Image (cartoon, rainbow, N blue to C red):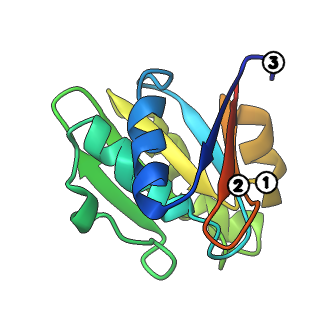
Amino acid sequence: MSAKREFHTRSSEETIAAGRQLTQDLTAGQMIILRGDLGAGKTTLVKGIAEGFEAARQEDVTSPTFTLVHEYRGQSVTLFHIDLYRIDTERELATLGIDDLRSEPGSILLVEWGEKFDKIKTECDGEISIDRTGENERRIVYRR
């Protein structure tokens, strides 16, 4: 991973706007790991990405913590927002059908907690990390 893009945000609205801007860097067929502590703003960033691709309105994007996979269909891409926080084994991971989702035409997979699994780490096309730098401030870095 070499190319890098960085944002500094001071509010949820700015984090959503950063997500919209990141759509310029994302293309169909990619799997991107979303890194960040609980509550860092991963789903907030996905709200902007989904809106930027016209796949969902920001108010319709929610955390997939309990459903594990959310699907947002746009004209040009289908976003799959996946949360592996509660997935502990390779066997559980296999039941999600990530390979099938990735092979769907026009798909982009945004995977929270993907760094837990070697398979995801080796097959990913990049990562977006979100770090808190203050109560409302975030540093968002996209690496390919």
Q: CA distance from mark 3 to mark 1?
A: 18 Å
From the image, tell me which residue sits under label 3: 2
Along the viewing direction, whichever of 11 and 109 lies nearer the viewer:
11
| Badge 2 amino acid | Gly
From the image, tell me which residue sits under label 1: 115
Along the viewing direction, whichever of 17 and 44 lies nearer the viewer:
17
The numbered dot on residue 90 is none
- Quadrant position of residue 132: bottom right
Q: Is residue 22 left or right of residue 1?
A: left
Along the viewing direction, whichever of 21 and 97 lies nearer the viewer:
21
Above or below for 101 versus 87: above
| Badge 1 amino acid | Glu
Residue at (38, 38) in percent of width and height: 20
Residue that extends furthest to the left in the rendered view of this protein: 75
| Badge 3 amino acid | Ser
| Percent position of residue 107, x then y | 38, 34
| Percent position of residue 27, x then y | 44, 22
Residue at (47, 82) in percent of width and height: 66
Quadrant of the drawing holding the N terminus = top right
Q: Earlier in the sequence, mark 3 or mark 1?
A: 3
From the image, tell me which residue sits under label 2: 114
Q: Are marks 2 and 1 in contact (CB under 8 Å)?
A: yes
Residue at (36, 62) in percent of width and height: 70
Q: Residues within 10 Å of mark 2 (few under 14, many from 20)?
A: many
SS of the residue under disc 2:
helix
Q: Earlier in the sequence, mark 2 or mark 3?
A: 3
Above or below for 84 versus 33: below
Q: Residues within 10 Å of mark 1 (few under 14, many from 20)?
A: some
Above or below for 108 versus 24: below
Q: Is residue 81 left or right of residue 121?
A: left
Q: Residues within 10 Å of mark 3 (few under 14, many from 20)?
A: few
